[in-house]
Image (tube, rainbow, N blue to C red):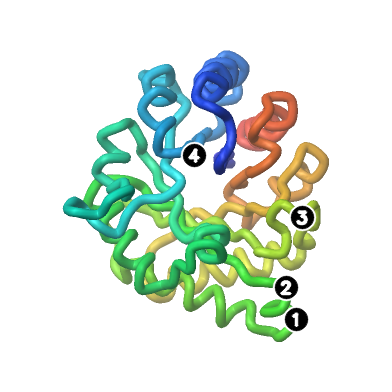
């Protein structure tokens, strides 16, 4: 099964988010038999979007969570709060969190712990900058970012990792098929070596209706994490449909 995850980022006012969630549900009832669809929404949208999607095949995720569980931390939203509001997943380590908010592995390790304690499925985002790629540091960077994953499997949990080369996010640029395959195989091999866990590895970075077929067809790609193209049904639906088509075989 190929997975399609949507990261709405800081977009879609609440009324639009709710209406879009309803429209997405209505448009993907057949496709959902063959693919897993998750929408990652802002904290203020988790409860209302989860409410309209309750008892449906569409799942909801948070775009981030706090490293704190509770206490005097004004403005923070804990993993338990996200879970209680209806989230089943949480994004951790997105490049925009790393870039704009200075998040490093020590902080992300704490967020990972809080997410697991709250029963959320973490989706760890990893990826290199263009400068790091040119310097031949891709595997070094990815390995360091993967280091926050616990080195033992928890029950039947499979780690989910989203490879998003920083230079391809929101730029219209895209990693080549060879580059994607190389990094995805590295991630899978590395996690298997240290934990015995078989990970799910998604690709993100300017995924669009135009490149969806080439990316989703790659054997090492278990799905996609879609940013800008997930904000409108007419651009997101073709990606879901392609994932479902591949999932039938």
Calculate the distance from the C-alpha at mark 1 to the C-alpha at mark 2. 6 Å
Label disc, if present, on residue 130 of the rendered structure = 2
- Viewer-proximal residue among 96 and 227: 96
Residues under numbered marks 4 and 3 in contact, where contact means CB atoms less than 8 Å apart: no
Position of residue 177 measured from the top left corner of the image (x, y, whole percent): 77, 60
The local crowd at label 1, few if under 14, some if 14 to 19, many if 20 or more residues have their Cα within 10 Å, is few
Q: State the residue position of label 1.
A: 134
The local crowd at label 4, few if under 14, some if 14 to 19, many if 20 or more residues have their Cα within 10 Å, is many
Q: Secondary structure at mark 2?
A: helix
Q: Can you name the residue that lies furthest to the bottom here?
A: 135
Position of residue 179 measured from the top left corner of the image (x, y, whole percent): 73, 67
Q: Residue at x 58, y 72 (%)?
A: 186
- Viewer-proximal residue among 49 and 223: 49
Q: Secondary structure at mark 4?
A: strand
Position of residue 43 measured from the top left corner of the image (x, y, whole percent): 40, 38
Q: Earlier in the sequence, mark 2 or mark 3?
A: 2
Position of residue 219 measured from the top left corner of the image (x, y, whole percent): 66, 54
Left or right, residue 213 beside residue 56: right
Q: State the residue position of label 4.
A: 40
Q: State the residue position of label 3.
A: 171
Question: Is residue 30 something that shows in the picture?
Answer: no
Q: Residue at x 75, y 61 (%)?
A: 175
Left or right, residue 57 beside residue 6: left
Q: Secondary structure at mark 1?
A: helix
Q: Residue at x 70, y 77 (%)?
A: 133
Q: Residue at x 56, y 58 (%)?
A: 96
Calculate the distance from the C-alpha at mark 1 to the C-alpha at mark 4. 31 Å
Calculate the distance from the C-alpha at mark 4 to the C-alpha at mark 2. 26 Å
Locate the N terminus and report the quarter of the image it occupies. top right
């Amino acid at each position: 099964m190929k997975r399609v995850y949507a990261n709405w980022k800081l977009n879609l006012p609440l009324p639009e988010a709710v209406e879009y969630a309803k429209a997405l549900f209505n448009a993907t009832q057949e496709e959902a038999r063959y693919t897993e669809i998750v929408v990652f929404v802002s904290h203020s949208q988790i409860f209302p979007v989860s409410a309209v999607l309750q008892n449906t095949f569409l799942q909801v995720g948070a775009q981030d969570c706090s490293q704190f569980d509770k206490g005097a931390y004004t403005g923070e939203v804990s993993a338990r709060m996200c879970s209680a509001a209806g989230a089943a997943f949480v994004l951790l380590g997105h490049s925009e969190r790393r870039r704009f908010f200075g998040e490093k592995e020590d902080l992300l390790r704490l967020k990972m712990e809080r997410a697991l304690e709250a029963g959320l499925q973490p989706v760890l985002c990893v990826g290199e900058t263009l400068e790091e790629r040119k310097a031949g540091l891709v595997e070094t960077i990815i390995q360091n970012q993967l280091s926050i994953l616990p080195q033992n499997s928890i029950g039947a949990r499979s780690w989910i990792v989203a490879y998003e080369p920083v230079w391809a996010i929101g730029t219209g640029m895209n990693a080549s098929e060879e580059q994607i395959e190389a990094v995805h195989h590295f991630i899978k091999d590395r996690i298997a070596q240290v934990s015995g866990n078989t990970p799910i590895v998604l690709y993100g970075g300017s995924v669009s209706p135009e490149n969806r077929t080439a990316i989703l067809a790659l054997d090492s790609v278990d799905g996609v994490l879609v940013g800008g193209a997930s904000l409108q049904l007419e651009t997101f639906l073709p990606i879901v449909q392609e994932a479902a088509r591949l999932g039938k075989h």
